[in-house]
Amino acid sequence: MVFAALGCGGGEAPPGPTAPTAEERARLLLAPEAPLPSRAETVALADAVAIASSHAGATARGAELAELAAALRVRLYRLDRVESDGREALELHGAAAAAFRTSGDAEAACEAERQRALFAGDLAGDAAVTYRELYLVSRRHAAHEGRRGASPSASAAAAESPRPARSACLDVVEKTLARAVAYRPSGEYLRALEQEGHRAEQSVLGSAPASSPVLSSAAPSASVAASAASPVSISTADPGADLVLAPRVADKPAGPIKIAAIERHGSEMGARVIIQLTGPTTFKVGSLPADEASGKDARVFLDIAGATARGIARETQVGGALRRIRVGAQAEGTRVVLDLAASLYRRIYYLPDPFRIVVDVSTRTPTGEGKSSQEPGPRAVRRVAIDPGHGGADAGAVGPTGLKEKDITLDIAHRVAPILARDLKIETLLTRDNDVYVPLDMRAARANAFHADLFVSIHCNASEDGLARGVQTFSIDAAREADRSAARVAARENASARGVASDPALVAEVSAILSGLNVGNLADRSHHFAGLLQRSALSSLTPRYPDIRDQGVKSAGFYVLVGADMPAVLFETAFISNPEDEARLATADFRQKMADAVVNAIRAFREGK
């Protein structure tokens, strides 16, 4: 609404002061003493500056506005701790760096990337993340400097002009890395980071391909041996980086297929996306590297044949290693795009009954590298994921007096975690910390995102007649054939959230998937750790319970362990269906001895036993 001032004077009133622009208002709000207006107003102002930056394009002006919007989002985040503010700040810092680079200001681009790296660590609350991000900045910026120095124009001018001064920003980054050396990863984590740095460097130097091959689920790569009779097609795009396992289906799906849901779990170090479908179908996989000039992230995409996505959000923000998920219709199906924070290692596979596609991305190589059971010497174990089975509406097995498996497993997990932290100085993740339901597929996803070195899923066994007793430990190993009793246990555990893997064809299909995911010596290490845990449990229990029965170490296709990129086992503490075992499970003494067994097995594995 406009108000007009009426008066009797003969002259015109002097014009009032000009309202400040969005940019001017934003700069005023960055002063530490400046009070912020309401959150809604501040967010709108940051968005207005970001839009102005977008309109300015990849220019110095556009970069300056992106930095201003980022700074305002950072201040909002520090006051309100709203994660979306942090994610927006990271994206705006990245956009500023790309625009500075395009406009020719390499030093400002480096500084924008440095600010982004520092804030990424702040957002994650992890100095190791800061180290990783700064390391990648140093590799990218050093490559940019090298490329400028090697250009024809630079060579022609070298004889007539002094060599350009070394980047002040790069010096600051390298000095910060030197001070933060305590947070530098080691072992396989360091190798993975160095490989990621190499890929970042090569993308700058122009040697990275514009796009990687599109992998089809109907035609496996010749580089990977696969039996023609196998129900699974195995393809690789980049050895050591990409693995694709898809159903060997030659024809398009007979009926309509719908994407029922897209689940996701992410962290700064990795993520898992699960695409739930109403039926089996084929899919193709492709990837594209990051494009700094256009400000586009690295991405991997899946073209799912014959699928519709009605009711599925077109874009979902995630954060961390996986920035967002985008969904779009195509002529012959649906494309699902994952925008990544970096060029990450990728594994794409499917699971049947019900049919879903699983996408794992990680900063850690999925090759299963690590000392085999035959190699002497200590093993690196710094992080462990403990998975209390079942939870929430899924009670698991229930004993004769009503004791619930979900309560026993959570209590044992709560006993394990503080001992690992106190006695072994091991960081521990519980896949659930209270009585909530966590889907089976998401449990290994949380362990992967945590970059756990070991994964232990705790359960209570059950039998139909209630007579069976004792302790049993399982690992996933397609090379070791599961016996009938092990298959029954796996079917019961898998049925808690998905389907019952009892059909012979389905069992063969799951076995083929496990074989494809068994990279490096991961299965060997899992089986070895399972043996340590079984022996540790018997040692812990026998003095107090001399009649404890040893049910041994076996292999079976447990969904909760599928896709774990570290040695993983499922520990059946006792038969809750047996009255005597149930009575023992109800005591704190028995549960504590089970917790001690888990801790001692982890200690033995770390010591190289």
Image (cartoon, grey):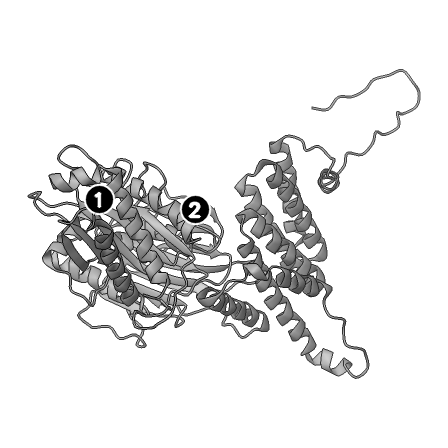
Which-is-in-front pick, marks 2 and 1? 1
8 left or right, relative to 546: right
Q: Which residue is mark 2?
A: 314
The residues bearing labels 2 and 1 have C-alpha atoms spaced at a distance of 30 Å
459 sits to left or right of 468: right
- Secondary element type, mark 1: loop
Closer-to-camera residue (522/120):
522
Mark 2, Cα crowd under 10 Å, few <14 / some 14-19 / many 20+, is few
Residue at 58% across / 70% down in the picture?
204
Res 414 visible: yes
* Residue lying farthest to the top in this orientation: 8
Q: How far across and how far down the image is residue 225, in percent?
A: 26, 75
Q: Which mark is residue 30?
A: none
First-in-chain label (2 vs 1): 2
Residue 222 position within the rendered picture, expressed as x and y whole percent measured from the top left: 30, 76
Which amino acid type corresponds to the residue marked 2 in the rendered image?
Arg
Q: Which residue is mark 1?
A: 496
Residue 97 vertical placement versus 151 (above, below) = above
